[in-house]
Image (spheres, rainbow, N blue to C red):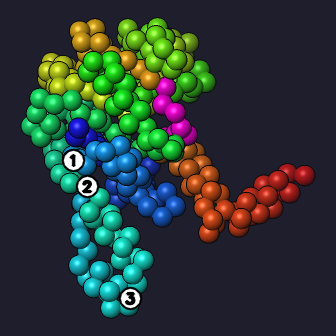
């Protein structure tokens, strides 16, 4: 299976940080968030990856490309560990880049991959969702996709009511533990109008029919082609499942989750954990008393 990672958005919620650097390159500890997403795909056995980029996104291509001068310097200085780390990033997957000339929405970004994907099912992973789990998030959905006879599957998460208006929310019936048959989807429902407490997260497995629905989807809010609109057609015509993804999820499109991801992942690292923990205890717990 191939994977598509849309990364051509403008990142307006992260300004001014994202004025001259892609949101997908924001660091979480020692690597840009898009690297975690590529690693998740690779750990799921997906090594043909299309990244949808746009103007100002060169840093993403450079990150996964060879860096000859840097490698030469590391070789000269016998920095073998660092050299191996770079080579692992460069050889991780076959990465292809497609330019979305105008950021006309997530749906349009996915549509840009149509020629590369062809008539096969494919996975979509959004760079601003980080899932930390032993079993990669997208592989959980791929398994369900196969088991359900090739019907689309979207990752979902149960959220408190007050957070739902930031996400697409599904309505449907639970058919197995954590798996829902989706009847409908609403993008960013106003408070009190949510069809459930199940929000979609940025992990999907689609059959190629999604492209036909995207082509028929007119621009919606803000002139953007919404992936949710095309998914609503897919749900009605071919069928769609929602699956609660196991693992910790960080919405790196928000300041709070981005900071939380950095702190929580740092706490788990042998080289940083003890130091961060005692700093947190001193600066948060003791100050509070
Ligand atoms: P978001 O709406 O979260 O990202 O899209 P954004 O547009 O970059 O951020 P804000 O809302 O302005 O702060 C989810 C994903 O879809 C990609 C983004 O790069 C992000 O990874 N995307 C969005 C595209 O590739 N093209 C688009 O036209 C829109």
Residue under label 1, please give it.
48
Residue under label 2, please give it.
93
Q: Give the SS element for disc 2.
A: loop
For marks 2 and 1, give the CA distance: 6 Å
Count of marks, rendered view? 3
Could you say which disc has been placed on residue 104 in the image? Answer: none
Crowding at label 3, few (<14), some or many (≥20) Cα neighbours within 10 Å? few
Q: Which residues are magenta?
A: 244-251
Crowding at label 1, few (<14), some or many (≥20) Cα neighbours within 10 Å? some
Crowding at label 2, few (<14), some or many (≥20) Cα neighbours within 10 Å? some
Residue 31 x %, y % = 43, 61
In the depicted structure, whether residue 227 falls above or below residue 110: above
Q: Is residue 219 left or right of residue 262?
A: left
Residue under label 3, please give it.
78
User: Which callout, 2 or 1, points at the residue further toward the start of the chain?
Assistant: 1
Tell me what residue is drawn at x 21 percent, y 29 percent. 121
Tell me what residue is drawn at x 48 percent, y 14 percent. 176
The answer to whether mark 2 and mark 1 are in CB contact below 8 A is yes
Q: Is residue 10 magenta?
A: no
């Amino acid at each position: 299976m191939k994977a598509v990672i849309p990364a051509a958005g403008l990142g307006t919620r992260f300004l001014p940080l994202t004025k001259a650097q892609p949101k997908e390159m924001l660091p979480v500890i020692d690597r840009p968030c898009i690297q975690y997403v590529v690693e998740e795909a690779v750990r799921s056995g997906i090594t043909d990856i299309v990244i949808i980029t746009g103007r100002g996104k060169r840093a993403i291509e450079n990150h996964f490309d060879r860096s000859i001068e840097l490698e030469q310097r590391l070789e000269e200085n016998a920095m073998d560990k660092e050299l191996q780390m770079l080579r692992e990033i460069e050889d991780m997957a076959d990465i292809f880049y497609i330019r979305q000339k105008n950021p006309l929405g997530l749906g349009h970004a996915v549509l840009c991959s149509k020629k590369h994907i062809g008539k096969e099912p494919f996975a979509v992973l959004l760079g601003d969702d980080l899932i930390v789990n032993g079993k990669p998030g997208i592989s959980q959905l791929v398994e369900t996709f196969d088991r359900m006879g090739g019907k689309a599957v979207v990752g979902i998460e149960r959220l408190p009511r007050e957070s739902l208006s930031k996400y697409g929310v599904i309505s449907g019936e639970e058919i197995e533990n954590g798996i829902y048959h989706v009847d409908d989807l609403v993008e960013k429902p106003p408070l009190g109008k949510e069809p459930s407490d199940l929000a979609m997260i940025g992990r999907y497995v689609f059959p190629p029919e999604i492209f036909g629905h995207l082509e028929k989807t007119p621009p919606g809010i803000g002139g953007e082609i919404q992936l949710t609109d095309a998914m609503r057609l897919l749900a009605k015509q071919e069928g769609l499942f929602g699956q609660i993804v196991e693992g910790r999820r960080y919405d790196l499109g928000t300041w709070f989750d981005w900071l939380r991801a950095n702190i929580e992942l740092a706490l788990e690292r042998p080289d940083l954990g003890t130091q961060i923990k005692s700093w947190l205890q001193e600066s948060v717990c003791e100050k509070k008393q």
